[in-house]
Amino acid sequence: MMSITKPSLKTAKARARLPVQGRPHYVVVGPNVFLGYRRTSNGRGSWSVRVTVGRTYRLKKLAFADDLDAASPPKVLDYWMAAEAARVYGRTEIAEPRTITDAIERYKLDLERRGGDAYNAQRALYHLTPALAEKLVDGLTVDDLAKWRDSLTAKGLKPSTVNRTVSCLRAALELAAESDPRIRNAHVFKTGLKGVADAQAVRNVILDDDMVHTFVAASYARSHALGVLADVMAVTGARPGQLARLQIADLRDGQAPKLMMPRSAKGGSEKRAARKLERYSVPITRALAAMLRDEVFGRNDHDAPLLRQADGSPWGDKPHRFYQRDIIAVVASIGLDRSTTLYALRHSAIVRMLLRNVPIRLVAALHDTSVQQIEKNYSRFISEHVDEIARAALLEPATPCRQ
């Protein structure tokens, strides 16, 4: 954490009274610009600058301080020289309104710092025209952004894909506005990048139990590694990214076998990286536990990935890159609609629990999602079974009804 010091850094004598510590002592020398001084045990301190840009910051070492030697730029600077160098660096970092490309790059760095998926920043960049990419953020209009959003639909992108792309650009622009108070058109971003209506129209493919077994069997036929991945997903309903981060130690093989599933860490929280380290318990069948026990036989590194590709390598952060073509072949081989993806196994697992009257809160917890998302995306799949579910709770008469 950065601390702003009260003592003056203007003279070597004043700086000599500061404690020796690893973190610099900072003073404000301009808007969002801090001059840092780090005192060392040998008496030769150094200057640095920290520039705050919204939720991110930039650090740069400037020079040695004139503690032992007279000032001789650029290697040795007195306080006034260092303060001016810090302000110049600050103006370079935040002086001008950024272009959309710059804003996206800043957003990418922010995502990386928070442990997010940097691809989300790049998503919009692939669809920007050169002219729009270089347009200044503070010069954007509702018309600029709305036309671009509509062009994504004209390209044939699915409504849900359009909304994901639009949301990524809006997040980048809003971060830029937070970073520079001179960007005063933030209201434009929300209006011009409004999401496409009905993007959440029913797209989830739900398979009955027989078809789930067929899907898993066809995956095994394609490759053993793919079959294992599909098998675990069919039982747990976890996301592929969560399964890829399972470790051998996460298999708890006892009387009541389970997996300690890593959380997905979806969302934009600052605590994303910490959430990805959390685990929650997911019950599995004894048959699946036995299969996984065979998979890890002879492997003694408990921190190693539980599930692996055919060549023994991990599935990685983006497992779909490795299984996508195989799943397309699996889907075609069993006669499913080509829009079906591996996620059909997750959707089917969730609906299976709902239809078996597992409380919705428990279904949400076991699938690392929220009750709101369950109701939004899956309630319609049980609407036709409401009569059957409700009928089981009806009060029967105490005596037989007369015919």
Image (cartoon, rainbow, N blue to C red):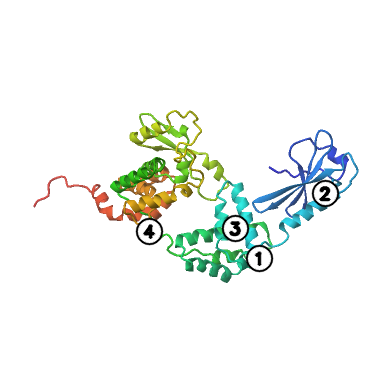
> Which label is found at residue 82?
2
- Which quarter of the image is occupied by the N terminus? top right
In this rendering, the label closer to the viewer, 2 or 1: 1
Q: Which residue is the extreme one toward the right?
A: 70
Report x, y in % for residue 268.
55, 50
Helix, strand or loop at mark 3: helix
Question: 10 Å neighbourhood of mark 3: few (<14), some, or many (≥20)?
Answer: many
Q: Residue at x 63, y 60 (%)?
A: 101
Front residue (pair 131, 64)? 131
Q: Are marks 2 and 1 in contact (CB under 8 Å)?
A: no
Question: In which image quadrant can residue 363 be found?
Answer: top left
> Residue at left 72%, top 56%?
93
Query: What's the amino acid at mark 3?
Result: Ala
Q: CA distance from mark 2 to mark 4?
A: 60 Å
Q: Earlier in the sequence, mark 3 or mark 1?
A: 1
Marked residue nearer the N-terminal end (2 or 4): 2
Residue behind mark 1: 136
Q: Quadrant of residue 173?
A: bottom right
Type of the residue with mark 2: Ala
> Tag 1's secondary structure?
loop
User: Which residue in the structure is indicated by mark 4?
Assistant: 202
